[in-house]
Amino acid sequence: MEKQRRRFYELRPIAVVLSYLWWLLNVVIVILWAPFMGAFRFVTRRRDPGRHRIGRILRNAGVVGIRMNPFWDFRVIDAVHPDARRPYLFVSNHRSMADVWILSLLPWEMKFLSKESVFHVWVLGWEMKLAGDIPIERGDKGSARRALIEMRQRLLDGSSVVVFPEGTRSENGALGKFREGAFRLAIDLGIDIVPLAISGTETALPKHSLVFRRTQASVEVLPPVSVAGLAPGDAGGLAERVREDIARALNLELEAS
């Protein structure tokens, strides 16, 4: 029965219909979340300057989306259990737009860096701003500087931040070079880094497609990397160390630089 069911879901016409229904349901979720988030933020504004609680409400919308998606079997692998009471810089590889959803399964509130254009999406962009997420325009140095300023403030407010230091989604599964800016900021603020290794999401939602495929994917939480004793000039070496940790967890070989 299970085998027949999987074949049924994987038929292209069925997959297209179910995928578009899922996107429609997500639009409904975003709209339903908006008044609740607005009211909650109004009530907790003074007690929650770091926007931890309002951020979790938005991430929970992502969790609901995962639970409603019949194609996705996403899980968290966490033998580390980082201290949720302190801020971290979470660093993840980037394989698919589905990465945002799988990261919402993590139990810690993290502020996301997201493309500037997403913040212009009706309702969703407002919710992301309300939650404290950070816009960035790829290739725009001024936008990158503003994003680092906002990241600094979030971390100083006690919120964790998650970044994709490759800058864009991988086309072939390889792990691209990590940009140093976020690592330099972590050193400056004395914020430890938690690497995250995402695997499987590249088939969950292929690039340039809105149609899902049946996928098992995971995000593995790796041991924190301390920045103690490091200077800003060590950011490149730190970035490479974190990249190597993620590559090792994913069983990837890195090209010699």
Image (cartoon, rainbow, N blue to C red):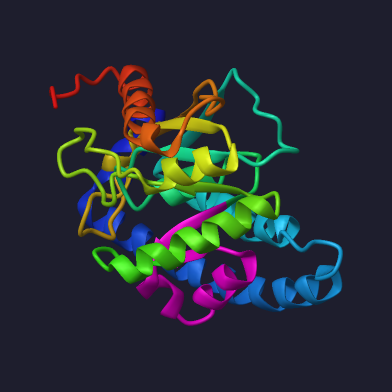
Labels in figure, total:
0
In the picture, residue 94 is in which quadrant? Answer: top left
Residue at 50%, 67% in the rendered image:
25
Side (left or right) of 207 relative to 73: left
**Above or below, 80 relative to 49:** above
Residue at screen point 52% across, 29% down = 227
- Return the residue nearer the eye: 142 or 194: 142
Query: Is 46 covered by the magenta stretch?
Result: no
Of 150 and 11, the residue lying toward us: 150
In front here: 23 or 251? 251
Image quadrant assignment for residue 87: top right
Whether residue 117 appears in magenta in the rendering, the answer is: yes
User: Camera-side residue: 26 or 10?
Assistant: 26
Return the x and y of residue 192 as percentages of the image width and height.
57, 32
Residue occupying image coordinates x 34% and y 45% = 165
Magenta-drawn segment: 111-135
Give the image location of residue 27, x and y in percent: 49, 72
Can you say whether 172 is above or below 48 in the image?
A: above
